[in-house]
Image (tube, coloured by chain):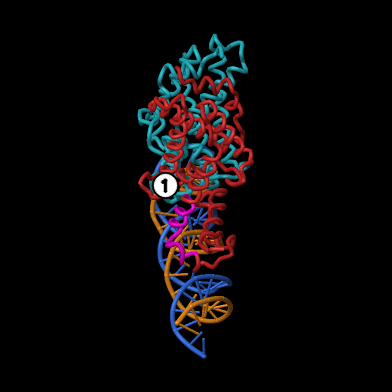
Chain colours: A cyan, B red, C blue, D orange
DNA sequence: CCAAAGGTAGACCGACCTGTCTACACACAA
DNA sequence: TTGTGTGTAGACAGGTCGGTCTACCTTTGG
């Protein structure tokens, strides 16, 4: 297997489970069974490796999420699919995303508070990409295709609930199942209102 | 001023702005103008200092939040007050909480992934305390005083939205104002449904 | 007056960090 | 065959970390 890819995969696993600052280069080398020189042949610094991990995670997460909400034709349908997907991730039923440990981007951003840092920028970019995915999906429903402002508002609502659900699960180690109640979702996603 | 309190205050400021791992003991000593021996007279380790910071922050945040939602007699009223308060915090109009840098407990939990770590436990405890504050306040409204299950569900919804709002603001550096629309809040907090 | 408590200043220890470098092994194409 | 690229193994440098310790100073109460 391609060494570079192998290193990124190994590093992503470790960074996601333990946080960036808690995982040293030497630990990654051992986990990946790779020499230090090899790592520094492919990445000029730990920071560049972290960026590569963020990009891989971004791509993986978006691919996974897209699959979970494909063919959602109504806002209610999308909401149900979204929260069911997040809940399954939290309950470790989404092997593509690894053992649940919260949102990698929120965790990482917490370790890089300066907003102009390249790593912080990648974290923000991921969030924008996910929001845009939700906006696009909502805009394609028959109920919202002529109401772009409403689509944005509902996407923001979904996004906020999703983030909250993930963060709560991360910190308190509990899963919110109330967000899967159909009547609540109908109320949240009421397009007429 | 009491040295111990002074150290905790200084450390909390620094930890909140930069994260725990990014702030060394020596940096705190300089900021607080205190000798290393003095710090280690009051705290056996950095970890104990971090715990003291978490406790101070917990107490400060809960006091602030209680003040913001006092006298809310309806769920809608509470929701409006809550999101207005969080928005004002994000916009740096809540000096008691310092320059906004997300939720200190979520940020800190991200740096301590093992859920049995004392620091992680304090983070979780804070979230439970806040949730209980919301449940109590909702339970005291005339509309919900006989519906404890509904009060819990609505409190969880508010909590999830609050967490999401804070995390999004932290990562993307934007404030969600859609959560202050009265018609949306009425829909969210509809007790009949 | 003097002992005790608690402060300052900072040297120092061992551990660990990122990143560089040397020395060597192997595959493969010119 | 020989040079080049890529790999391994790991010593090493320079710095930072948390935490200990010595030496000295200041306040205060008996």
Q: Main secondary structure of the magenta part?
A: helix
Extreme front residue here?
A: B142
Q: Tell me where residue A19 appears, x and y as whole percent.
A: 45, 44
B132 with respect to B186 (left or right):
left
What residue appears at the point 54 percent right and 68 percent down from the top-left corner? B35
Q: Image height check: is A135 above or below B14? A: above
Q: Image height check: is A125 above or below A22? A: above
Q: Image height check: is B76 above or below A102? A: above
Please state which of residues B16 and B4 is positioned toward the viewer in this rendering: B4
Please state which of residues A118 and A132 is positioned toward the viewer in this rendering: A132
What residue appears at the point 54 percent right and 21 percent down from the top-left corner? B186
Please state which of residues C2 and A47 is positioned toward the viewer in this rendering: C2
Question: Tag 1's secondary structure?
Answer: helix
Q: Which residue is mark 1?
A: B122
Q: Disc 1: which chain?
A: B
**Segment colored magenta:** B39-54
Q: Image height check: is A63 above or below B135? A: above
The image quadrant that residue C28 belongs to is top left
What residue appears at the point 59 percent right and 27 percent down from the top-left corner? B180
Badge 1 density bin: few <14, some 14–19, many ≥20, Cα 10 Å: many
Quadrant occupied by the C terminus of chain B: top left
Examine the rendering and report whether any part of residue B25 can be seen.
Answer: yes
Q: Tell me where residue A55 appears, x and y as whole percent.
A: 52, 34
């Amino acid at each position: 297997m391609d060494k570079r890819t192998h290193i990124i995969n190994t590093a992503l696993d470790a960074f996601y489970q333990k946080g960036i600052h808690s995982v040293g280069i030497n630990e990654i080398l051992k986990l990946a069974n790779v020499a230090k020189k090899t790592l520094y042949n492919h990445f000029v610094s730990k920071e560049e490796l972290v960026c590569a991990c963020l990009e891989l995670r971004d791509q993986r997460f978006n691919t996974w999420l897209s699959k979970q909400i494909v063919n959602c034709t109504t806002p209610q349908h999308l909401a149900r699919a979204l929260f069911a997907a997040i809940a399954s991730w939290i309950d470790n039923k989404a092997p593509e995303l690894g053992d649940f440990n919260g949102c990698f981007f929120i965790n990482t951003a917490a370790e890089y508070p300066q907003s102009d840092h390249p790593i912080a920028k990648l974290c923000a970019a991921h969030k924008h990409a996910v929001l845009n995915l939700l906006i696009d999906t909502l805009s394609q429903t028959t109920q919202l295709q002529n109401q772009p402002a409403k689509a944005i508002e509902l996407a923001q609502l979904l996004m906020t609930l999703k983030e909250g659900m993930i963060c709560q699960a991360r910190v308190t180690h509990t899963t919110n199942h109330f967000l899967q109640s159909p009547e609540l979702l109908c109320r949240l996603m009421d397009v007429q209102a």
